[in-house]
Image: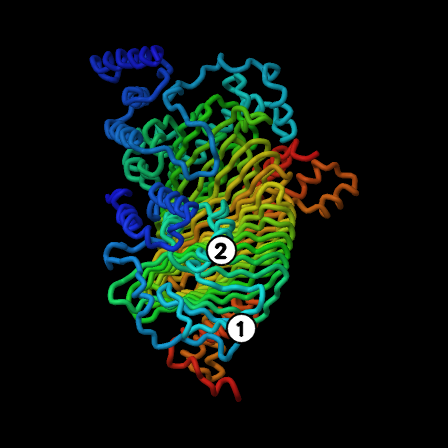
Amino acid sequence: MRNMVNLTQPYVDQFDAVKERLPGAQLPWLEARRVAGLARFKTVGLPTVKMENWKYTRLPNLDEPGFRLATWDDGHVAVAGVPAFFSDQTALVRLVYVNGIIHPELSQLDQLPDGVSVEPIAQVLETDPGFIEQHMGTEAVAYDQGFAALNAAMMESGTVFRVATGVVINQPIEIVYLNGGTAEPIYRHPRNLFVLESGSQATLVKRHAGISAGAYFNNAVTEIVVGDGAILRHYTIQADCLEALHLSSVHVRVGRDATYENFNLAIGGRLSRTETRVRLEGRGSHCNLSGAYLMKASEHCDNTTVIEHLVPDTTAREVFKGVLNDEARGVFQGKLIVHKDAQRTDGYQMSRALLLSNRAEMDTKPELEIYADDVKCSHGSTTGQIDETALFYLRSRGIPEALARNLLIQSFIAEALEEISDLRVREAMAHQVIHWLPAQCYFAEEWKQP
Amino acid sequence: MSGKAQTIEQVREFTDDSYKYGFVTDVEVDTAPKGLNEDIIRFISAKKDEPEWLLDSRLKAYRHWLTMPEPEWQKPKFPAIDYQDSYYYSAPKSVGDGPQSLEDVDPELLKTYEKLGIPLFEQERLAGVAVDAVFDSVSVATTFKHKLEEVGVIFCPISEAVKRCPELIRKYMGSVVPYTDNKHACLNSAVFTDGSFVYIPKGVKCPMELSTYFRINAENTGQFERTLIIAEEGSYVSYLEGCTAPMRDENQLHAAIVELIALDDAEIKYSTVQNWYPGDAEGNGGIYNFVTKRGACRGRNSKISWTQVETGSAITWKYPSCILQGDNSVGEFYSIAITNHHQQADTGTKMIHLGKNTTSRIISKGISAGKSDQTYRGLVRMGPKAEGARNYSQCDSLLVGDKCGAHTVPYIESKNKSSVVEHEATTSKINEDQLFYLRQRGINEEAAVALVVNGFCREVLQQLPMEFAVEAQKLVGISLEGSVG
């Protein structure tokens, strides 16, 4: 058996080699946090299936493709263009990163209203380090996972998104991360910080896409603060390429009467894992964590969520739906924790998966941990295949089988998409789903109009 | 320390002596000294006059046990168990040891018996009162035995079965729960002292419900009980374990193993009512009930059904499971777990679907009151070859009071597309409207709570054999006493 020291050592060496060049190297407090993160990483180690939280997700051998840390040059690989998401100019602002480096020529930043800023973290560390010191790496991020701790040590890119008190923006803000396209496989440790001051509202669309088929490894940590009465709609589209590894942990704190809405659509990636932890810290706060995943080949998608109800009168809702084809594997682990005295909590959780192949696998672990009595919590989970009677019904109406199957998959996923409150985003997401379906029949315009 | 060394020395002397004369000598010592080592295991085996192979398997288990770490993943927390601080063998108590009449028995216990409506002679038996040898229950047992022998059913203590039908024991014991399974099962494999053995021959429908309570020599089956039930092709048996009344028990750690084997078209129904001493209202004392229960549906169309009512013990930690190997086999799990005061329970089931068209059903009702903590933990696994398999699980938790906890941890793994798995869980507090309705009809609060909880559990209570069900309903109410107001 390989021992822990050997496994973590290459990362530790790497840290020593690059620490001078990491953003904010001149800041003593940041250095202290990086060192603490590295120490934590050494104790916790790399995740293994023996850890309860990683029971169903086995990391591939990371030494094998020989990942190296991304450099400035990697940020300037040739990019053909940015894949479309919204059909028109829906997005108010668009930021495009290539392997962690922002590209102004692909971005569109001129319409940024007052009180809103979207900037690379390296830039904010120069202009306003105090802001980052205040909000980043708080107790809300426990770093109980090795990779999150490693991110604390190594973070080198990412976005800081700020909305000032009372500012309401309706149009979505789009951040696009293009990855890969390099000769050798690279890995990165992006760090995002989104802070919505009290009473503000915003919609954020985060997209991850592969530039070419090559391997890359993203180890992201995002921290989010939703101030009192604020609303954040946070949508992620993860369309990484077949070789990509994508680990992401999201830590959210929700204030009084605030709402946090999160939807994660995963349609690609060799291994993707999103661990979302929400702390409902203010009375009357609400969160909706939902998502859909469509996986094929031997892709692996893991959605792990932890929602903590810390005070009375908080509500949470989760709807996850997945479609698994070929040898794909889906994992859903959802935990609701109702702390002592968090009375009148209302928690709902639903996970459904559709297996299209006999080699596909779905593992579900919905958990309730409840220490208060006046609560209403429930969860449900189903795994099954396409309903044969529904299929027969459609075919009896003259719809070809392949199309009928696609229609049923679409309608299955649609139930999750309904959790998205921004209709423009919902529509664009639905479009992404259609493109994932087997190609021969997804268009079928003739079925739209009689 | 010197006491321990002395004990070890005593045992060594004793066993060395035995070696000299062989193990056939009639040993006069009735209780093995405290502690656990190979010599104690040899002592137990010799006491029971066991064949060589059984001693070997005990020793193998013991040696493996030494290498196993204490499990840590469970929710209940308790101080580390000092395995060297208990007795692993004591001969059945003689008549003179127990209380001489009901007047000597703890009045609290008697009050509970009264509420459960248990007849007087049974009360005496349960409380361990020295009962006249020709008294009622013994004659019941004798008639019982004749009836079973007529149809060929074997129902006897497992130590007797080792002598009567060693080939069956060798073939099946440990085949469902291997000694490597978990730390407590491993300990049981090394030191089990007694338990029940049931064998139902081909095509036989067992004419009556078998119950540990009425079995001859049922007394003192001890803390390391071992049960093995084999249902041959086309047979049926319903087995009842435990009883609703609290039993007098001096052992803190109970680590039992129950193995069920159902062959083609056979059905086993296993019902448990567990009401061991839960400790006092402050959480002192009480039984640790760490049991490994597992059934294998080996044959086609076989069925195993577990029903449990768990109200006792300071800590209950068990997962009665079904391995559905045979095509079309069926597994069922119906459970009520009630915890009050400082009790902890971590219970649930595992349904492992391996054969085609296998189906399973899980209904679990947990009620937490007082400062207790309860976890449902279950696994449903659909193997790649379990085509057309089906599972439905429902886990409901009810919270009574704001100091208790209720947790649900289901694991659902599906490895083939044609199987369907459904899981639902809810947690809520006891319905105020229902309580109010009952209260305004003059029913006091405690009785009202008992009534509502009984309604909450009715799906499981219905699964119990008639005579159990009536008592279990009363038990639900009694277990929740002191949880309101």
From the viewer's perspective, is A3 left or right of A388? left
Q: Which quadrant of the figure contains the N terminus of chain B?
A: top left
Rendering coords of residue B308 (x, y %):
51, 40
Q: Secondary structure at mark 2?
A: loop
Q: CA distance from mark 1 to mark 2?
A: 22 Å
The numbered mark 2 sits on a residue in which chain?
A
First in sequence, mark 1 or 2: give its number. 1
Rendering coords of residue B80 (x, y %):
42, 27
* Residue A332 visible in the picture: no
Rendering coords of residue A85 (x, y %):
46, 74
* Label 1 environment density (alpha carbons within 10 Å; few <14, some 14–19, many ≥20): few
The numbered mark 1 sits on a residue in which chain?
A
Q: How many marks?
A: 2
Q: Which quadrant of the figure contains the C terminus of chain B?
A: top right
Q: Return the mark for residue A128.
A: 2
What residue lies at 51% left-to-right and 28% top-to-bottom? B140
- Both labels 1 and 2 in a single chain: yes
Q: Secondary structure at mark 1?
A: loop
* Label 2 environment density (alpha carbons within 10 Å; few <14, some 14–19, many ≥20): few
Scheme by which the image is coloured: rainbow
Q: In front of the other: label 1 or label 2?
A: 2
**Relative depth, front residue between A61 and A151:** A151
**Relative depth, front residue between A32 and A339:** A32
Q: Return the mark for residue A111.
A: 1
Q: Residue furthest left?
A: B20
The answer to whether the residue labelled 1 contacts the one labelled 2, judged by CB atoms less than 8 Å apart, is: no
What residue lies at 24% left-to-right and 59% top-to-bottom? A65
Callout 2 amino acid: Asp
